[in-house]
Image: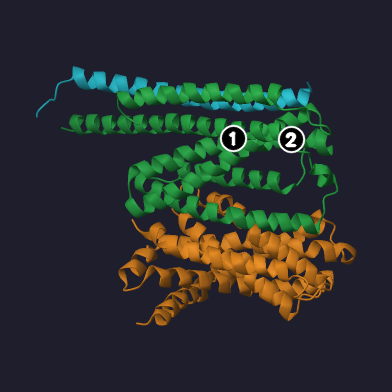
Chain colours: A green, B cyan, C orange
Amino acid sequence: MRGSDNYLAQHLLTVGSGLVMLVALGMVFLYAPREAVMGDVQRIFYFHVASAWVGFFGFFVTFLAGVGYLLSGQRRWDVLALSSVEVGVTFITMTVVTGSLWAKPAWGTYWTWEPRLTISAVQLLIYVAYLMLRGSVEGREQRARFSSVYGIVAFVTVPLSWFAIRWWRTIHPDILTGGDQMAIAPRMIHTLLVSIGAFTLLYAALLSLRMKLEWTSDELIRMRLKLERRSRG
Amino acid sequence: MSSTLFAAYAVFWGLTFAFVMSLWARQRRIQQELKRLSETFERNPPAND
Amino acid sequence: MSFLRKLLAVINKDIAAEMHTREIISAMLVFSLLQLLIFSFALDLHAAIAETVAPGVLWATIVFAGTLGLNRSLAREQRNSCIDGLLLAPMSRSAIFFGKVAGNFLFMVLVEAALVPLFSALFGVALFRLSVLLVLGLGTLGYASVGTLMAAIAVNTRAREVMLPVLLFPLALPVLIGAVQATGGLVSGGSLVDVAAWVRVLVVYDLVITAVSLVTFGYVLEG
């Protein structure tokens, strides 16, 4: 993301994702019908599902970038992996918080070990650990190597955790979450799809901003080295 | 409109806004430092090259 | 040297070092006993509730004590720059990985060998059964496998002791769920068939995580 062409593309992406987000928001409140059982609270669902999906997608990108880094050793893969985790953590935090807000009117409690909510919380913990790991390793090359490995292994455990949690919930049936079924109208599906599209665009916009930040910070490090080298003669 | 719904959408916008602001603040700090260093670099010509 | 001979060499080295210092097993063992004491008071553990709580307590004890052993085992390599020596030796990374996993597995199993009779005696749950021991073995194997990889990373960080549990616990979740559920089902009178789903979780986790750890372990050492 360097150069003035990219500068334009960057702005188009940022503005475009903002516009599509507004469209999605309008659809959530004006286009989608009021759900019969849950009422207006159900309108949380669209952005909640979209952020969960995009968060998970962000971690998948980190997994791929981790593989890319280990195979090639190129800095850009590490920049991509790190940026994707930061954006993913932002989105998955939204998922967990709004899921807990949703749980209150739906099931009468702020937290339930509902599998989808639980796996989001597990992912949040995993990728916060990823960021802590990065903060705790000396040396850029070693940091990139370790976090690539962690990003790969972590992502592989997510589906395993998902199945384990789901079976665990079936063994301890949760009466609270029994009434989960809602009647899905076509307009709801349209709204959900546009929301997911909007969040994906927002992901791309935030990702490219975060990557740009990392490249600028690289430039700063190079400049510091240059000055240091010269002052030493 | 329920307050839960309002709170949830406040969370979506709030977190997005917070993340963008953190990106902006970090970007600005780095760019200022970069500018300062490059000015230092221009001002002091190489000593004994 | 064949692969097996190299593997045994790594394990022998770990055992010899442990025979000499006894730091890993003794630390894990004492720590486990302390945890048992804490859990007994914290949960007011007595025979009446033991059947529901014991599997969770047992695995929590194993998981926490395990981090101690894993950290020590890999820190020892790092402190003495042993890894460099191993890397210089004509030895594949997979032999080093399997050797370390086997060593850690062995240490954890030895601690469990002391824990199981103690648990059976204290809480009156029947753990001395082949099926329970199988579940213990499968759970410990998966945990030692991903734990060895994470410990190899954690010992190279600034906050090493803190870093290992933070990295490891969320990844070891499937092992913990599977092992606690399987042990619980067996303790409350079920047979292996009744807990087959959980045993399958453990087996799949062991296979997948060992494969992924094996592939990525070389990248952790290199550099």
User: Which mark, residue A185?
Assistant: 2
Q: Splitting the image into 4 quarters, where does residue A3 fall?
A: top left
User: Which mark, residue A196?
Assistant: 1
Q: Residue at x 55, y 61 (%)?
A: C147
Of labels 1 and 2, earlier in sequence is: 2
Q: Are the residues under marks 1 and 2 on the same chain?
A: yes
Where does the image place residue C139, in percent across and percent down from the top left? 64, 68
Q: What's the distance in space between the residues labelled 1 and 2, CA to CA?
A: 17 Å
Q: Residues within 10 Å of mark 1 (few under 14, many from 20)?
A: many
The answer to whether any part of residue C120 appears in the image is yes
Q: Nearer the viewer, residue C164 or A32?
A: A32
In the image: residue A172, left or right of residue A155: right
Give SS at disc 1. Answer: helix
- The amino acid type of the residue labelled 1 equals Ile
User: Which mark, residue C78?
Assistant: none
Where does the image place residue A170, in percent across and percent down from the top left? 78, 57
Q: Residue at x 34, y 64 (%)?
A: C84
In the image: residue C200, left or right of residue A141: right
Q: Chain of mark 2?
A: A
The answer to whether any part of residue C26 appears in the image is no
